[in-house]
């Protein structure tokens, strides 16, 4: 109290209060950066040689060539779109029982653990790795891609649906239970109306993600537009690659806007 | 039950027209599904599909004891993978933060020109997966870590940019007004009014993206962009399944650790 009233003010630290920790973290970050940047080997001759290709790629992006490879592009696009839709439908159909099973408030413990481990397995493996295996098992083509996307959808929808069911308003479930409803009736009249709008929203969102992923898994041979993109890049046909990328961006943007609109409408 | 006759209509959730429309909608969905399925499986060779359980058993048998001794050759690629993810995230943040301020409707300097431009960059970056970015960059820059870092950075721009500009738009206007009322300049309004409000969200988003980037950088090597994916690719090409299974275990372990770290950090921040 005896100290003079301070005349200047310093902004207090927002995240880490202790000064020692701040200094230690800063030193650690600098050491890490030095070590990490040291591992980056840049072959400047190769980069400079590549600049010309980069320019051609940008030129190809500005002047895309839709016509020369249109057959490949349209086939790939068709495969991607059909794969996206079928895998989302099947994935959602499978993930609904799994999601219900993975909700602690409606499923018995042993079912809960089985369903949770299915979800964990599906979420931990990236699409690409799963696609590599499915291509090895089922041969090249859209079917392997379809299975990959279905598998990934199960983990995504299953987890979010289970969390949603766990978050429902218990009062409604209790009211239905008080009428003497069976377990199926409980699901149908207490749970389903509460989670349905969100399930539809999630499915639309997943449709959007599946399309994006379908563009990628083609690189490892699982069909779709990714295969066409990979071919055109390995042939250095940047104008075709630019056209494919522009198509992907356009479809993703469209899907995003329409799914946002649909989700608002469902709510 | 026979009481409910013509004068007291039975309660129904929807009108007749509503029910008809709903059924028509479902029918259209089913028809679309069947058509898509036919289209998709046109070129499927079913012999392979029916043989898949045998093939799976075969691969499983060959892959089962992972070749643990191969681990000593995986430490360096693993370190590369972590570096690709971390440096890529940092580079992505450096580019995403200015874009987010340009894209947020309350901080953008020009609504007509810069905002749509920033939004387009964000959407374009988000719609192209990092593996495709890597494919492009490898063909331009040549194989190596650099292509991987840039691919991760380009993909992160969209993610961080989008979440951050939404966070900026949700800031409390009262605090900004209070700072403005003290006669603060534009820069001071940003640093004292807006930045403190979005800082926790910013750290959360960055750590979350870093976690995703660890997953993605593990597979970038498949197209030649460095990291542990390169080992995966060469083992797959040699059909060395015991090595493949070990690499996948290592990737899984890394992903689980990074997810744990990111969950801890986000929990501490929020």
Image (cartoon, coloured by chain):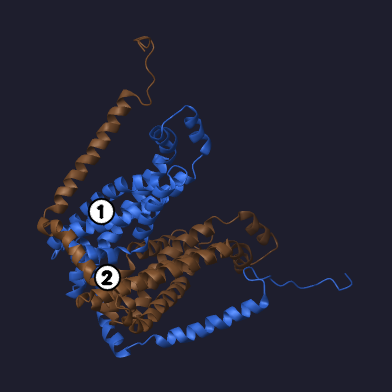
Chain colours: A blue, B brown
Q: Position of residue A176 (x, y in %)?
A: 47, 31
Most foreground residue, B16 or A45 = B16
In the figure, B104 relative to B17: above or below?
below
Q: Quadrant of residue B238?
A: bottom left
Residue at label 1? A84
User: How many discs mark residues in the rendered view?
Assistant: 2
In the figure, B131 relative to B51: above or below?
below
Give left or right: position of A117 versus B260. left
Most foreground residue, A232 or A214 = A214
Q: Secondary structure at mark 2?
A: loop
Residue B222 visible in rendering: yes
Give left or right: position of A164 versus A136. right
Residue visible at 45% across and 64% down in the picture: B161
Q: Are marks 2 and 1 in contact (CB under 8 Å)?
A: no
Most foreground residue, A14 or B6 = B6
Residue furthest out toward the bottom: A45
Give left or right: position of A232 versus A16. left
Label 2 crowd (10 A; few <14 / some 14-19 / many >=20): some
Q: Secondary structure at mark 1?
A: helix
Residue visible at 32% across and 89% down in the picture: A44
- Please identify the quadrant where the C terminus of chain A is shown: top left
The mark lying in front, picked from 2 and 1, is: 2
Residue at label 2? B64
Residue visible at 51% across and 34% down in the picture: A174
């Amino acid at each position: 109290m005896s100290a003079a009233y301070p005349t200047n003010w310093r902004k207090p630290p927002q995240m880490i209060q202790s000064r020692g920790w701040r200094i230690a973290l800063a030193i650690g970050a600098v050491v890490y950066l030095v070590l990490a940047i040291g591992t980056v080997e840049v072959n400047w001759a190769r980069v400079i040689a590549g600049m010309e290709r980069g320019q051609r790629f940008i030129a190809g992006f500005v002047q895309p060539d839709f016509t020369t490879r249109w057959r490949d592009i349209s086939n790939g696009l068709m495969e991607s779109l059909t794969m996206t839709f079928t895998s989302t439908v099947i994935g959602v159909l499978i993930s609904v029982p799994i999601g219900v099973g993975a909700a602690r408030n409606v499923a018995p413990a042993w079912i809960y653990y089985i369903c949770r481990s299915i979800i964990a397995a599906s979420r931990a493996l990236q699409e690409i790795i799963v696609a590599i295996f499915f291509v090895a098992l089922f041969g090249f083509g859209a079917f392997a891609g379809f299975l990959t996307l279905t598998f990934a959808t199960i983990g995504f929808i299953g987890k979010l649906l289970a969390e949603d069911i766990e978050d429902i308003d218990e009062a409604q479930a209790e009211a239905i239970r008080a009428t003497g409803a069976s377990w199926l009736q409980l699901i149908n009249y207490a749970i389903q109306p509460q989670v349905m709008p969100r399930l539809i929203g999630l499915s639309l969102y997943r449709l959007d993600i599946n399309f994006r992923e379908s563009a990628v898994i083609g690189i490892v041979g699982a069909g779709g537009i990714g295969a066409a993109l990979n071919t055109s890049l390995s042939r250095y046909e940047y104008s075709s690659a630019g056209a494919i990328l522009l198509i992907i961006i356009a479809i993703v943007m469209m899907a995003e806007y329409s799914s946002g609109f649909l989700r608002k409408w469902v709510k | 039950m026979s009481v409910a006759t013509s004068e007291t209509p039975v309660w129904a959730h929807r009108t007749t027209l509503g029910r008809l429309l709903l059924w028509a909608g479902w029918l259209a969905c089913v028809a679309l599904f069947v058509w898509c399925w036919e289209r998709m499986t046109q070129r499927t060779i079913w012999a392979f599909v029916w043989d898949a359980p045998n093939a799976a058993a075969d691969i499983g048998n060959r892959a089962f004891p992972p070749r643990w001794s191969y681990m000593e050759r995986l430490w360096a690629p693993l370190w590369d993978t972590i570096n690709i993810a971390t440096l890529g995230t940092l580079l992505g943040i450096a580019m995403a933060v200015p874009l987010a301020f340009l894209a947020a409707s309350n901080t953008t300097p020009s609504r007509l020109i810069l905002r749509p431009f920033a939004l387009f960059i964000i959407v374009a970056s988000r719609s192209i997966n990092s593996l495709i970015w890597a494919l492009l960059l490898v063909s331009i820059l040549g194989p190596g870590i650099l292509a991987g870092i840039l691919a991760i950075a380009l993909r992160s721009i969209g993610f961080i940019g989008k979440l951050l500009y939404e966070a900026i738009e949700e800031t409390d206007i009262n605090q900004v007004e209070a700072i403005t009322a003290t006669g603060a300049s534009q820069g001071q309004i940003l640093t004292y009014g807006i930045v403190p409000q979005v800082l926790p969200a910013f750290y959360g988003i960055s750590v979350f993206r870093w976690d995703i980037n660890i997953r993605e950088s593990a597979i970038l090597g498949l197209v030649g962009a460095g990291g542990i994916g390169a080992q995966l690719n060469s083992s797959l090409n040699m059909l060395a399944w015991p090595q493949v299974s070990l690499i996948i275990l290592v990737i899984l372990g890394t992903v689980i650790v990074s997810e744990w770290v990111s969950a801890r950090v986000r929990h501490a921040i929020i």
